Amino acid sequence: MIPAAFEYAKPASLEEALRLLRDREGEAKILAGGFSLIPLLRYRLAEPGILVDIGGLDGLAYIREQNGEIRIGGRTTHRALETSALIERTSGLWADAAGGIGDPQVRNWGTIGGSIAHADPASDWPAVMLASRGSIVVRSLAGERVIPARDFFIDTFVSAIEPTEILVEVRFPVPPPRSGGAYEKLERKAGDFATAGAAVQVSLGADGTIAAAGVALAAVAQTCIAVNAAESAIVGTGRSSTSGRWPGRWRSAPSAGRWPGRLPERGETTRVSTIHVAVTVNGRSHEGEVEPRRLLVHFLREDLGLTGTHVGCDSSTCGACTVLVDGVSAKSCTMLAVAVDGRAITTIEGMEHGGKLHPLQQAFWDQHGLQCGFCTPGMIVQASWLLEQNPDPTEDEIRHGIAGNLCRCTGYVNIVKAIQQAAGELREQAAPAEPAATA
Ligand code: FES
Ligand code: FES
């Protein structure tokens, strides 16, 4: 489905974004990663008058320790949390959840602020925030509020954020020594929202029993909920030994063309129905006019004629539409074309060089990984991102890395073999040449 028309603005500063929210109160929506909002737009469950894209506010992307808290900027991606040494070192609960949010493409672009502000009862971060007794910082032109997570989630898709406020930061207290936690969820398949999820954080006292606990559930009520009764029930229980050993956290399963068409100045709200966009696609520059509601996948296929990028599910699930945006894999059915202005896109058509197939394309051929052929372009593009991140992945890492690309026909065996073959080929190509033997 195609979203209803809306205006689009990309403010250059938080102040500008806040002014837009004040001036267009009640009809503006914030666009962060887009993975929560764009499906709502597509199903016409949300029809904002204007989208305020905060994708350019890089100052809101950070993870740091301050005053005994971990502070995370609202535009921090799930991927940044998944790969953060600070998170890994500080909180088993957060590290555990970060690797299981959506799928790799969703983690690459989705943001924690977007996820929490969305207040979906089936999403993971709200439960993690409740269990870790975090707080949410929101800002408006009137100032800043710090809202405890336990007062933040009000109803399904309803939070304590006012229409003139932006979520700028989330915080949680650094757990004391001898703490542990985990996030577990039931899901129909990798990348799904939780059918049910549980976040638990506990800290042991000097006597080895549980001194503090946070327990929260996802997808079982109208909002994610803290389970006070479970917390009270387990505090004071546990081992009475003072050996000091704590099992730590446990993880879930491993996580110059032109098309028909003035670029708005940063901060400018446009009321025209199209916006001038300039992008590089497969090394070639393109510029022209696009409607703000045009999805990247439709822009690539219909405006540029690059039909190798497929549309499978149309709902950010199957991965058939995967492309690289500035080298990072993304689902193009869940991105707006106007949001990639100034960026470089790679599609399946850009993978071969000089008439020679990319090693991944060749390996899919050799190993019969093509199978249906429909999902294959997305699989290959996603695999290219995976091998950039990890040139020598294990089978488990490959399966985890392509979890956002669904095969509904034959299975993943030949696909995994193809990626292993290509990984070997690419490593060989990257290896320094042997010095020539001397007589
Ligand atoms: Fe984009 Fe399925 S994920 S079409
Ligand atoms: Fe495309 Fe299985 S290879 S659905």
Image: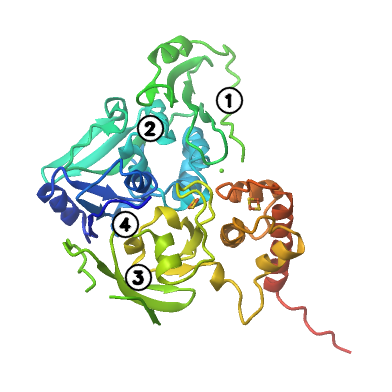
Secondary structure state at the residue bearing disc 2: helix
Q: Which of marks 4 and 2 is nearer the N terminus?
A: 4
Q: How many marks?
A: 4
Which residue bears the numbered disc 2?
Answer: 126
Secondary structure state at the residue bearing disc 1: loop
> Is residue 300 shown above or below 211?
below
Residue 298: x percent and y percent? 41, 62
> Is residue 400 shown above or below 331?
above
Which residue bears the numbered disc 1?
Answer: 246
Label 3 with label 1: CB-CB less than 8 Å: no
As measured in the structure, the alpha-carbon distance from the residue carrying label 2 to the one carrying label 3 is 33 Å
Residue 116: x percent and y percent? 34, 38
Q: Which residue lies furthest to the right in this view?
A: 439
Question: Dot 4, crowdedness within 10 Å: few (<14), some or many (≥20)?
Answer: many
As measured in the structure, the alpha-carbon distance from the residue carrying label 2 to the one carrying label 1 is 26 Å
Q: Nearer the viewer, residue 28 or 387?
A: 28
Indicate left or right for 243 with 193 as reference: right
Residue 55: assigned label:
4
Residue beneath the point at 47% across and 77% down: 283
**At label 1, which amino acid type do we have?**
Trp
* Viewer-nearest of discs 3 and 1: 3
Residue 342: assigned label:
3
Quadrant hosting residue 70 = top left
Q: Which of marks 2 and 3 is nearer the N terminus?
A: 2
Secondary structure state at the residue bearing disc 4: loop
Indicate left or right for 51 with 437 as reference: left
Residue beneath the point at 59% across and 50% down: 401
Residue beneath the point at 64% across and 59% down: 373
Q: Which of 160 and 369 is in front in this view?
A: 369
**At label 2, which amino acid type do we have?**
Pro
Label 2 with label 1: CB-CB less than 8 Å: no
